[in-house]
Image (tube, helix red, strand yellow):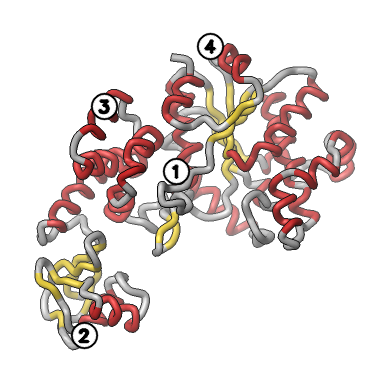
Amino acid sequence: MNALDTLKERGFFNQCTDEAGLREHLEQPQTFYIGFDPTASSLHVGSLVQLMAMAHLSRAGHHAIAVVGGGTAKIGDPSGRDSTRDILDEEKLAANKAGIAAQIAKFCDGRMVDNAEWLDTLGYIQVLRELGRHFSVNDMIRAESAAQRLERQQGLSFIEFNYVLLQSYDYLELFRRYGCTLQVGGGDQWYNIVSGIDIILRLEVCKTFVLTTPLLTTASGAKMGKTAAGAVWLDSGRVSPYDYYQYWYNVDDRDIERFMKLFTFLPLGEIAAAVAGDYRAAKRVLAREATAVVHGREAAEAAQAAAIAAFSGGVSADMPTARVNFPLSLPDALVSAGLCASKSEARRAIEGGAVRLGDQPMPGIGMTVDAPGVLWMGKKRAVRLEPA
């Protein structure tokens, strides 16, 4: 199957510059790239759409370039933001680059480059002469990333205003170095990416392509990868495989099939069969397979076993663990386990009947936890308590 059709069937397609031309282009192996700015030491679930798209294109025989944006991260992409990003120092950038490079490598069997390699050596006059003269300020202001900020009177710094020039230069440089003819990015990147193909057409007189993926929200309208506890990071040190599994198991029933297509490699026939049955079983398939993609098959199986044990009131070595000094008050136990942010929140949860130890309800604020066990907050969050 043509890679474009695969991406469309599985839900990765938002728009492209020339669908018929791109489909024909992808009949032969082509070089494509996707960029990831190292603004944190880990990517989160929101980045998985691009990572999975990269993997599907690679599996179809195309050649991936993953760009770790050590250069563009020094500027900060204004797309989808209400304020200017913090300026990162070199030490923080280096740590962030190392963190996300390891995660990208799980999805990219091709080339990985840092755009600081060429952006750091660009002279300001060179940028103005080679790139700046081709950009219309009127068009730049009308671009969604700028227009939204200006409409809300939040302003746009001059440094952010230049981001589109640098991203366009990335595409130009990758075309010149490696013959890259396709850039894939999020839907909010449309103007930035299209500007890149325009620059290549002007300076190299060659047609290239753009494909954007949809910006996902859950069926309830929430931003993908956000929970009450914060972002769902791909780093197991920030979100354990168990908690990552639980994130996928707890998705809205309406999202199961869509997320299976996007975030697992299961064939479409297997997905159709899974969602035709019991939805709880389908959720277990989604959670296991999505966890295996990021954390490996062994960690996924262990997370599933731990989740099953927790639901039956049992204990598993793979459950999240908090080490505490017994005995301790129930509110202190909830805070120590990370299930509540404060004692006042813990008291409200206890009074609301949301807390149990194993299969025993814990309805009283004055109750204590005297021995190891699984402490539950609601039906979905559990932590194993062990002696400190």
Label 1 and label 3: CA atoms lie apart by 27 Å
The residues tagged by marks 2 and 3 sit, at their Cα atoms, a distance apart of: 47 Å
* Circle 1 residue: 103
Q: Nearer the viewer, mark 4 or mark 2?
A: 2
Q: Residues within 10 Å of mark 4 (few under 14, many from 20)?
A: some
| Kind of residue indicated by mark 3 | Glu
| Secondary element at tag 3 | helix
For residue 365, the mark is 2
The disc, 1 or 3, on the residue closer to the chain's N-terminal end is 1
Can you identify the residue that label 4 sits on? 27
Q: Nearer the viewer, mark 1 or mark 3?
A: 3
- Mark closer to the chain start, 4 or 1: 4
Question: Total marks drawn?
Answer: 4
Residue 141 point in image, percent of width and height: 80, 47
Calculate the distance from the C-alpha at mark 2 to the C-alpha at mark 1: 43 Å
Q: Position of residue 371 (x, y in %)?
A: 11, 76
Residue 375 is marked as none
Left or right of residue 356, residue 183 in this image: right
